[in-house]
Image (cartoon, rainbow, N blue to C red):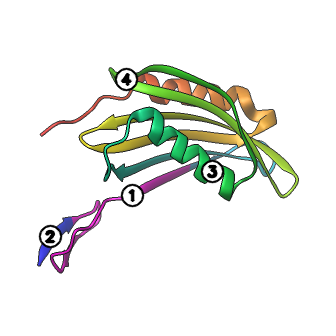
Amino acid sequence: MANYYINEAVLDLPERPLSDKTIHGLECKLSGDKTLCVFVHRRRIEEAKSLEELVEGNVALNKRRLLGFAVLEETETAVGGLPGIHVRARWRDQGTVFYQRQAHVVFEEQLMIFAVSAPLDEQAICDETFDDLVGTITWRTA
């Protein structure tokens, strides 16, 4: 048995090769019935791939899962002092066009994705929240 720690508890699980694919989702209600969402997703990198290849894989996954998903812009930049890639994207769901900003970075053999999304007409608050979030990332090391 191995101990696995989450914020609220410790779990004992059989010894198996498990990968942490935790997704943290935070929401903020905006005007009307609109919501601003912040996601932090981590995924262990199991094959030798470049950051660019990992981003391409995530974009391909989003294109399969989200209607009309399209990348508006992709730029190389620093994320918490590490090489990263920022992505601006949009997609549709139930008649609403959504806007999203993503920051992709590799930290300690994990792909970390920080994303902020909202309806397209709330793009300004989405950009502001994303810039604030990415501008404050500080990595914890053992």
Give above or below for 37 relative to 125. below
- Please count the marks in the image: 4
Distance Cα–Cα, label 2 vs label 4: 32 Å
Point 44% across, 22% down: residue: 135
Residue at the front extreme, as displayed? 48
Residue picked out by circle 3: 62
Specify the amino acid type for callout 3.
Asn
Q: Name the image quarter holding the N terminus.
A: bottom left
Judge the density around disc 2: few (<14), some (14-19), many (≥20) Cα neighbours within 10 Å: few
Above or below 12: residue 44: above
* Residue 24: % across, % down: 45, 53
Label ID, residue 3: 2
Task: For mark 4, give the secondary structure.
Answer: strand
Return the x and y of residue 139 as percentages of the image width and height. 27, 32
3 or 1: tag closer to the N-terminus: 1
Is residue 97 among what the camera can see? yes
Mark nearer the viewer, 1 or 4:
4
**Which of the marked residues, 2 or 4, is nearer the chain's N terminus?**
2
Q: Which residues are magenta?
A: 5-26
**Does dot 2 land on a helix, a strand or a loop?**
strand
Q: Earlier in the sequence, mark 3 or mark 2?
A: 2
- Residue 59 occupies which quadrant of the picture? top right
Q: Amino acid at mark 2?
A: Asn
Q: Which numbered marker is on residue 22? A: 1
> Closer to the N terminus: mark 1 or mark 4?
1
The residue at which mark 4 appears reads as 83
Report helix, strand or loop for mark 1. loop
